Amino acid sequence: MPHTNDLPEPAKRPTQAVILAGGRGTRLRPLTDIRPKPMVEFHGKPFLEYLLEMLRDQGFERVLLLLGYLPEVIQAHFGDGSRLGLKIDYVVSAIEDGTVRRMKLAESYVDPCFLLLYCDNYWPMHLNRMWARFAAADVPAMITVYGNTDGYTKDSVRVDKRGFVTVFDRTRTTPDLRGVEISYAILHKSVMSLLTDDPLALFEEVVYPQLVAKGQLAAFVTDHRYYSVGSLHRLPLTEVFLARRPAIILDRDGVLNRRPPRAEYVRRWDEFHWLPGAREALRVLTGANYRIIVVSNQAGIARGAMTEADLRGIHQRMSEEARRAGGWIDAVYHCPHDWNEGCACRKPEPGMLFQAQRQFNLDLPRTLVVGDDERDAQAAEAAGCPSALVSDGLSLLDIVRKMVNHA
């Protein structure tokens, strides 16, 4: 990869976001006959408002909206942005313009370093992590890539082990693509020099392949699913996600039940002993409408101390006793692998947390993980979740009561 010390060096992370929001949204008809697609409502609020609120909460101060189709609908709703604690500016161009043309018209409004978004993708971003990755990469551009291990959509990129994009293919026809570009791109303004004069061209199809050819397009890879208003079939999942039903993710041993000694396991139900207050905590959470998800390392399966059927029986009894106490455990995930198998699910790896995210459409930055050792906190950090650890002086019930009362 060419060295790029000639790039301008922003003193701090970007505070301006640029959102491409000019398309007709034909795949959403008839919903878009009277409104642009980012104005489709969920729970009484347009999709774009959720995006803007997230940007504000991530420390962005200014947003530049590039509009084309029915711009007055967006302008009338958001105005200057002060209602949301933002400063919103607009650049309006012809409906038929491509995003290259819209970006060229906006060039004088764009900061030396900025975040670029599509108006139809919501992904709960972590700007601090993204900025650290971007600064370390020393390139003019970094896109966000959804890992797509669940086959959520069709792959469009290939990323090497160093975290650089080696193939960018919006036609999705190149063999062995892995991952999907979802924008959330941090860009130096210098990339604007790569724009062509084709008024119908798309920014990503013009700029990103040129950067790939120079080895100058980094990737921030995430396994947290993104949510979209790009097509009608995506709307039901987006509706569920934006409802934001509260959820909590709990470790098992040492949080719900007494932890066995190291390298020993709860092999039968008669070895499972509830910790004081644990069932009451589950009751409080259920009464507050929380989803309760348990994630547990169970290397005893790989080591022959118990079978999958043994573990299934323990978790069935655990869930039954929780229900009798007034609590409801929605799901239990476990890692059956040994300590050194290198799987993606054994904590401190975050695989089980992402599995729960996809099954229940969780917003992980809003989902507390409660554990009892550093591996739980590390898994939470890797997944972008807040975390808390129980201790001799702080029980699960203490944590739950404080959380529910604060909410």
Image (tube, rainbow, N blue to C red):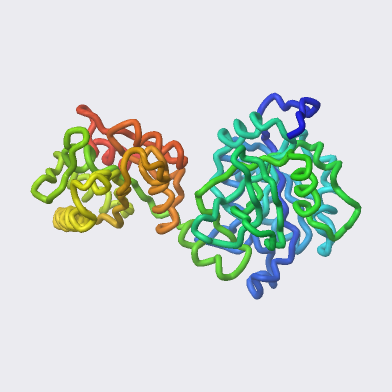
The spot of residue 163 in percent (x, y) is 62, 40
User: Which quadrant is the C terminus positioned in?
Assistant: top left
Q: Return the residue nearer the eye: 326 or 125.
A: 125
Please indicate, yes or no, whether residue 407 appears anywhere in the rendered image.
no
- The location of residue 86, given as percent across then percent down, is 65, 41
Tell me where residue 89 sits by quadrant.
top right
Image spot of residue 245 (x, y percent): 40, 54
Q: Is residue 338 above or below residue 10?
A: below
Does residue 130 appear left or right of residue 200 in this picture?
left
Give the side of residue 401 with respect to residue 192, left or right.
left
Furthest residue in direction bottom, as rendered:
30
Query: Considering only vertical position in the picture, is 234 above or below 209?
Result: below
Q: Nearer the viewer, residue 341 or 239?
A: 341
Q: Is residue 83 left or right of residue 255?
A: right
| Residue drawn at (53%, 61%) of the image | 152
> Depth check: 215 or 396 in front?
215
Q: Residue drawn at (81%, 52%), measured in percent from left and top?
A: 206
